[in-house]
Image (cartoon, rainbow, N blue to C red):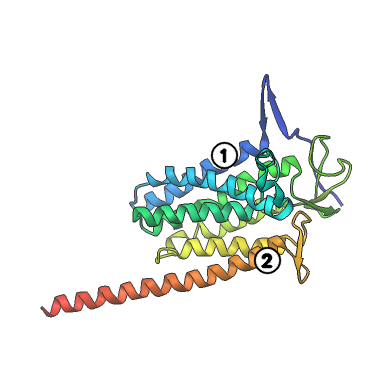
Amino acid sequence: MAVITIGIDPTIELGPITLAWHGITIALGILIGGLAAARWLRERDLSPEPMYTFTALAAVGGIVGARIFYLLEHDPGALLAPDRLIGSNGFTFDGGVILAALLIAGYVHRTGLSGRYLDAGAAGLPLGVAIGRIGDVINGEHYGERSTFLLAVRNSHPDALTPNPDFAYHSGGLYEVLLATIIFAVIWPLRHRFKRPGDLAWLVLGLFAAGRFFEFFLRGDSPQLALGLNNAQWTSVALLAIVVIGHALTKRRADQRATSADGAAVASAQE
């Protein structure tokens, strides 16, 4: 069967400057995802100004969290060795999302912003991930077993990260692009239907966790942990549990506020 063949050099040489496709697509993903989030806010007459901070927090949290999580999985000793802590390869998506989400949620809480801003970030996240992961496909990162599946990728450039340029492999990067694209295609047309703050954010996180759980049956870049599942799949299970509990708590808090507001309105009318 035909497979996808990519022969692009993972790096771009511009005189003394070397650019990596991975970094270029991540930067584009953050930018375009932020623009989508800003549009979501303008549609609700909310200021997009906080998105500048969101974008910075997403960039720092995404890179640092992804690197730390990768080292925890593959080389924990590197966390104690500064010279090995920094690297241009070796990042885990879950760690980046978790740390970025925590930083952004902390910022929203500290500044008293509406939960709508979390939904805005979630609305732009899938588009940003879809674009950012293109660099992984070009580099040949996050590959799985050799395959003749029509979505398998053969990175024919000798500097690609796949083991052999003559063979195609399951591409975790491509599967991430497809997963994020599908999530964006689902949630963006429905974005006006989410009335309660936080609902969209929980849904996007849940869809990513569920999608990645099944995706990692085809990938081989996460160590096995227990019960036939790898680290990434157990992380997805934990994230799904957090999503279910978090959504329930958010809903209960919103219902309590609505009940209190109704009670205050009735008391005011009686006066």
- Label 1: how many Cα within 10 Å (few below 14, some 14–19, many 20+): some
The image position of residue 175, as x and y in percent, is: 70, 54
Q: Which residue is labeled 1 in the image?
A: 28
User: Does the image show residue 122?
Assistant: no
- Label 2: how many Cα within 10 Å (few below 14, some 14–19, many 20+): some
Q: Name which residue type carries label 2.
A: Trp
Instruction: Farthest residue to the left: give it.
Output: 271
- Which residue appears at 61% of the width and 45% of the height? 131
- Which residue appears at 76% of the width and 54% of the height? 221
Q: Name which residue type carries label 1.
A: Leu
Q: Is residue 167 left or right of residue 78?
A: right
Residue 95's tag is none
Q: Is residue 261 left or right of residue 180?
A: left
Q: Which residue is labeled 2 in the image?
A: 234
> Which quadrant: the C terminus?
bottom left
The image position of residue 241, as x and y in percent, is: 58, 71
The image position of residue 107, as x and y in percent, is: 41, 52
- Which residue appears at 51% of the width and 72% of the height? 245
Q: Is residue 45 left or right of residue 92?
A: left
Where disc 2 sits, the SS reads helix
